[in-house]
Amino acid sequence: MILHSVMVSPSQSLTFTNLRNDIAQTVTVTAKDFPDGVNLSDSGNIVLEPHASNTKQLSLTVDNTKIANGIYTGSLVITIQNQT
């Protein structure tokens, strides 16, 4: 039997659209309240020009050397800031 110490969830797509016509916006996705050993694959920023859309691929990585098997909860926080 082969045991994997790191597991990666299937990738999920999140599409963001800037509905404003006068200003660009920065979208940030971060993980909140996940235990040590659980990481979000990409928490970088997306800059959206007016009326633009962009899709971000996200997955979770679980390091089983740092966290026991079980059921855990956490949140993804989406923050939007207007460019000045």
Image (tube, rainbow, N blue to C red):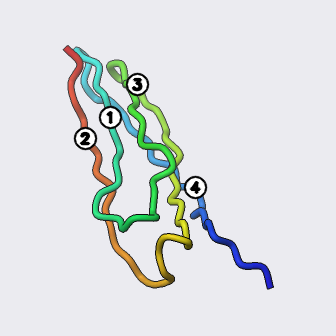
Residue underneath mark 3:
52
Do residues under tags 2 and 3 come within 8 Å of each other at their CB atoms? no
Question: Nearer the viewer's eye, disc 4 or disc 3?
Answer: 4
Residue wearing tag 2? 79
Task: Please tell me which of labels 4 and 3 falls first in the chain.
Answer: 4
Q: Circle 2 — which element? A: strand
Report how far apart the C-alphas of labels 3 and 1 lie in the structure. 12 Å
Q: Are marks 2 and 4 in contact (CB under 8 Å)?
A: no
Give x and y (percent) for residue 12: 53, 55
Q: Residue 4, how many percent across, how many down?
A: 69, 72
C-alpha separation, residue under disc 4 versus residue under disc 3: 22 Å
How far, Cα to Cα, is label 1 from label 4? 19 Å
Disc 3 versus disc 1: nearer the observer: 1
Q: Residue at position x 32%, y 19% from top?
A: 50
The residue carrying mark 4 is: 11
Looking at the image, is mark 3 or mark 1 earlier in the sequence? 1
Q: On the image, numbered disc 1 is attached to which residue?
A: 27
Q: Is residue 30 above or below residue 23?
A: below
Q: Amino acid at mark 2?
A: Thr
Q: Which is nearer the N-term, disc 2 or disc 1? A: 1
Mark with earlier residue (1, 4): 4
CB of mark 2 within 8 Å of CB of mark 1? yes
Identified by mark 3, the residue type is: Ala
Q: Tell me the quarter of the image containing the N terminus.
A: bottom right
